[in-house]
Amino acid sequence: MTTKKLKKDPLNLIIIGVAGQGNVLISQLVCNALANEGYLVTFGQTYSSNQRGGSVNNYVRVSKEIQCSPLVPSGAADVILGMEPLDTLRMLAQFGNPKVMTIVNPRPIDVAGRVSDYPDLEKLMETIKGLSGKTLVINATAEAEKLGDARMANMILTGALVGTGILPLDEKSIAPFIQERFPNDFDINMAAFSKGIELYQAAK
Amino acid sequence: MPDIDIDAPGTTALLMGNEAIARGALEAGVGFAAAYPGTPSSEILPTIVDVAKKRGIYAEWSTNEIVALEAATAASLAGVRAMSSMKQNGTQVALDFLGNLAQRGVGAGLVLVTVDDPGAHNSSNEQDTRHVAKWLDIPMLEPGDFQEAKDMTKWAFDLSEEVDIICMVRAVSKISHTRGNVKLGELSTRKYKASFPYTGGRPRMWGIAHDIQHKKLALAREKYEISPFNKYVGPEKPELLIITSGAAWLYTQEVVRTMGLEKRVGILKLGTIWPLPEKLVTDALDKSLQVLFVEEIDPFIEGSVMELAASQATGKPQHTFYGKRSGHINAYGELSPDDVIKALNKIMGLSYQARDTAYLKKVEAIPREYAINRGGALCPGCPHRASFWNIRTALKLDGRGGFATGDIGCYTQGLLPGGFSVVKTLYCMGGSAGIATGLGKLGQFGFTQPVLAVCGDSTFFHATIPAVINGIFNNSNFTLVVLDNTATAMTGFQPHPGTGRTALGEPARAIKIEDVCRSLGVPVEVCDPFNFKDTTNTLLKMMAIDNGVRVIVMKRECELIRGRRDAPPFTVTVDPDVCLGDDCGCDRLCTRIFLCPGLRFNKQTGKSEIDPILCTGCGVCVDICPQGAIKREAK
């Protein structure tokens, strides 16, 4: 059992991405590490029925006192971690508040089946910043491509999230779960995780 | 990752509700599990499969839900604890059997888990299975958190044996698909020697036993009155009593705490849903004259409690009831903490809000074009996209106003622009051929439109075969198009009778859809939907027959399964010197019409391009570009 206190109880995280980006993995790693530290963790999800291309909203709720419900109440997010800008903004509109910390990967994914075009990225990012108490732009996809695999953007963002220190977690508490998930590719995934911490240091 | 097989009682694991249900069954000593995939219930059986061999459990994906429940019942009759799991629509499929089973009694404990999908996030409709328990007189439990999902499932087996009736567990998506802390219990070491006691065993097969069934329900109710799954939390005399269950209990508990109302509001959380534990509810009703019901989908508890209150009303002060009838809680759909906040604000005259008005104004100022939801889309490289492209082309070339009737699976998206909207009807599993068999008999009333019934491979085995045979028997006129991607893809790639392996990974005879159809004596063609010319021509040829039932099997493996196993076959690029962009006259065919997420339009260059992260390298889009600008190079 941990003695580390939460900065707020319950602490509400929203991890948003497009199905296939791997945001569920971020949530699983963080949730398992938190449960291992003795917290009551609730990890709820909403998603559409398609295997790829739809939005996947993850609600991670941490408490020492109660088993929280699967959904975050409107306006009650403490952290929004967005793997995609448009989806990040949609989460801010529903769950944002003047204190929310937003971590965003600025790599757009087109909305298939839409008639109009993707909005202007620069203006979109400005709107995100305007609605966040603090915004950390983490170029996760671009950095993951440099590491050799764009899919590792999720590990970079996990590193950035842990790097902020808003969760009662550190590299040591999450590493065993990365090892468990990637027994054969532990080193490269850990490198991506560390890269995320480094990017957070540069972005803060 | 959570390990369902941890054999250390007292350990806390982070389990998904469906995993907790499976763990409860393992702790109860389930010996036989049968299911048909249907989200939000799909993970229950695979969780059992993961440990089945090691723990001596038999588990199967059955052809459909009624067969799954029948198979599980057989095990129960022979003395083996058994469970069947399905989504709400599946329970409807199993109803005929279930109605009979409910009056027959059981051998060993028999549990049916049904997962409802409030809000229909992963369903073709929304319905409340609790009515089935009331309708068919079956005891039903509903977990209010992840711990209860485990503990209740375990208890359901005991209850089934003690009361001698099948027991239902109803969960909702937000319990089944949410992870939470679960303290594990002891794994069962039960061993079975199965035998069917046909010479005077317990289950009574002959005669109507509704009277006995009512006595069994009364016994269940007695047990419910003292069940720890029902609890009251709050002051002795609250201003308002909330009666709730399931995920709605979690929202209620949390909101009462967040709004600081613990000393003013009492909560009766029910876990035993049917029959209603009347004494317990009466005691709670005596605490307050103001009562709010918070539950998901229909006013089931609300109706039952109001009925009970009416029956006891003589000489008592009258309650004021709030809930779905009064409009304080949504009459249908999924709830959220916000709904509970709204109801409490209104009833108690409060004005709680999570964020200030200034921030809300900023949210309202977000430009409309930024507020885009990602709707349904087929995956990059999905063979169904190619199949629908062929159907679209063939229907246009045929020119007789033909259309497709739809079915349940990924290809349901044939209703949407992502499937070129060629599908015009959507009902249930097997509904495509069922509707087509009727349409195909309307010739005598002047109906001339060609009809294509479009279903998937798993759906073909599940419920399409009787409709196809009906069409052949009655000489109906339609073409059945089976989109065979070798998996039950939408629910998570479960095996089915065509895949050649069972749930336990054992080899099985792979039943070929084309062989089944050929044995019925009708014209059958098999084609690769990526071969546009061949497939479109086959469709045209089959539609031109305009008589009897014809079958086309469009066969190509699900791209997600292929992609997990193999490297991409091609590197796909768009040659910017050949792509003419908006000057082409194709109206951005690849990014506006074909709609593969792997293709995008670059506003800066005014040309199409490949998104290298999303493109799976299937290469099919090469054949749709009128300019030949899309190139593929074998890897």
Image: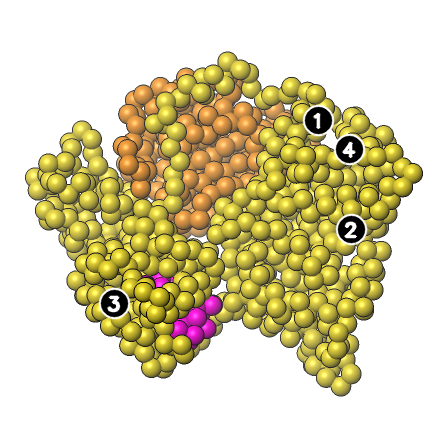
Q: Residues within 10 Å of mark 2 (few under 14, many from 20)?
A: many
Chain A, colour shown: orange
Q: Quadrant of the C terminus of chain B?
A: bottom left
**Which mark is on residue B347?**
1
Percent x, y of residue A143 = 31, 33
| Residue at (68% x, 27% y) in the render | B344
**Is the residue under label 1 in contact with that under label 3 (CB below 8 Å)?**
no
Q: Which residues are magenta?
A: B451-471
Of badges 2 and 4, nearer the viewer stands: 4
**Which mark is first along the chain, 2 or 3?**
2
Reading the image, the residue beneath label 2 is B276
**Which mark is first along the chain, 4 or 2?**
2
**Is the residue under label 2 in contact with that under label 1 (CB below 8 Å)?**
no
**Is the residue under label 4 in contact with that under label 2 (CB below 8 Å)?**
no
Question: Circle 1 marks a residue in which chain?
Answer: B
Chain B, colour shown: yellow
Front-most of residues B386 and B550 = B550
The quarter of the displayed image where residue B91 is located: bottom right
Q: Residues within 10 Å of mark 4 (few under 14, many from 20)?
A: few
Question: Circle 2 marks a residue in which chain?
Answer: B
Residue B538 visible in the snapshot: no
Residue type at mark 1 is Ile
Percent x, y of residue B557 = 32, 62
Residue B38 visible in the snapshot: yes
**Which mark is on residue B320?**
4
**Which mark is on residue B543?**
3
Residue type at mark 4 is Thr
Of badges 1 and 4, nearer the viewer stands: 4
